[in-house]
Image (cartoon, helix red, strand yellow):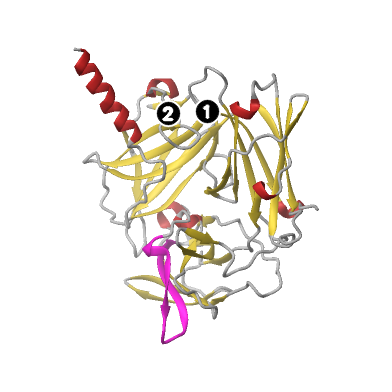
Amino acid sequence: MRLIILITFNFFLLLGFSQSTTEVTPPKNIKTIILQELTSERQVPLIELGKTLVFSFDDINGDEADYYYKVSHRNFDWSISPLAKSEFLRGMDDQHIQDYDNSFNTLQLYSHYKLQIPNSDVRIIKTGNYFLEIYDDNEELVFSKKFIVYKNQASVKTEIKRSRDLNFINEKQIVQFTIKPKNDFFINPKKSIKTLIFKNNNINNCIKNLKPQYTIGNTLMYRYDKEAAFWAGNEYFYYDNKNIRGGSISIKNFYINKVYHNSLYTNTSRRSEPYTYNPDINGGFVVRNLNSENHNIEADYVKIHFSLENYENMGDRKIYVIGNFNNYKLNESSELKFNTNKGIYENTSLIKQGFVNYKFITHTNDEIDHSLIDGNFYQTENEYTVLVYYKNIGDRYDKVIGIGIASSTNISN
């Protein structure tokens, strides 16, 4: 009996360690994945405890496939937490996504799936990091999406500063903040407090686990320079094809070949150009069709033809087009290829109709460079989010107890 118990324990232990700490990339037929709080306009997967999570995606196979969802609780580092499912959920997950509909009056057929939590089957009762995992009817994992549930138990005052390092004063933005509990003192904050700072809508591009530099009363002070520095980057490019049959300031032409095609005007490298203010939505995208009532199922899919003119030698670097529309993923579908006849880099991506932010980055030897194409300018408007995690003595999981948000529009020296 002891041997059976030991084998069973080791099996579940190995199963837990086998859980990935990174999102599983969806297959090519899964598009337009959106996860955000119901009442929020921010396209960030942050949900306040007790509020409603809204999750949706499209399957362009359009065959009304059956999908099921599971929710898993994670530690600060996204490894699986020791909590049993009954400790962070009320009800049962592993349920069929029943809210779906087929596209209407579109060239590209697709099925649109929508899920809200809480629902009649399940609700989340603990803060922390989570994975939402989508399975098919063969119980195989199709893709997964990170999200974070928080509760406002501490105030997080956040400011954006220019770098104090004169070498980077015009290129970097610094995130400085203070944390103050609303009701009590933190116990041993250098060990019990963890922080996560990310820029715009991308929770995967973050600075982790800065320690408080000093304490005034029950307030923790974070006044880092180098350690809390982000490259400022540049404003996002954008296009708007809500009117799918017309040109615009960014769309050169359209045509139909099985589906709609939009060719964008060729972008150029902005690294050596002076900074120009260009309002954006920080990498987000908004699905919309000018002539529809229900954008979710009446917005069509369009093959967008990106092109980039760049004369700098890329060497073995690869160039990608990224944004919230493709979850900032660097893969074959987002890579630009060099067209020797035209002398430009090109990419064609199938993207749902609407207003889309995008930018170009380079990648080599596991190093991502957000600035080689577009440069870094301290004036760039970016939004920064600071999350505070707390794990007291005896706690079994990392609670998310505070959130701070600041824009570099108000950057100061």
**Residue depicted at 32% across the width and 27% down the height:** 13
| Image position of 186 (left or right of 39) | right
Task: Estimate the spatial distance between the alpha carbons at disc 1 and disc 2, rounded to whole Å.
Answer: 9 Å
- Kind of element beneath mark 1: loop
Q: Is residue 88 visible?
A: yes
Looking at the image, the residue that sits furthest to the right is: 413
Nearer to us in this view, 14 or 108: 14
| Residue 263: mark in rendering | none
* Helix, strand or loop for the magenta stretch, by majority: strand
Does the stretch in magenta take in 342? yes
Q: What's the residue type where badge 1 is placed?
A: Asp
Q: Image height check: is 338 above or below 92?
A: below
Residue 15 in the image, given as x and y percentages of width and height: 30, 32
| Image position of 68 (left or right of 167) | left
**Residue depicted at 27% across the width and 25% down the height:** 10
**Residue depicted at 63% across the width and 72% down the height:** 271
Task: Assess whether mark 2 and mark 1 are in contact (beta carbons under 8 angstroms).
Answer: yes
Q: What's the residue type where badge 2 is placed?
A: Ser
- Residue interval drawn in magenta: 331-352
| Residue 398: mark in rendering | 1
Where the N terminus falls, by quadrant? top left
Circle 2: is it few (<14), some (14-19), or many (20+) Cα within 10 Å? many
Does the stretch in magenta take in 43? no
Label 2: which residue?
Answer: 81
Residue 80 in the image, given as x and y percentages of width and height: 40, 32
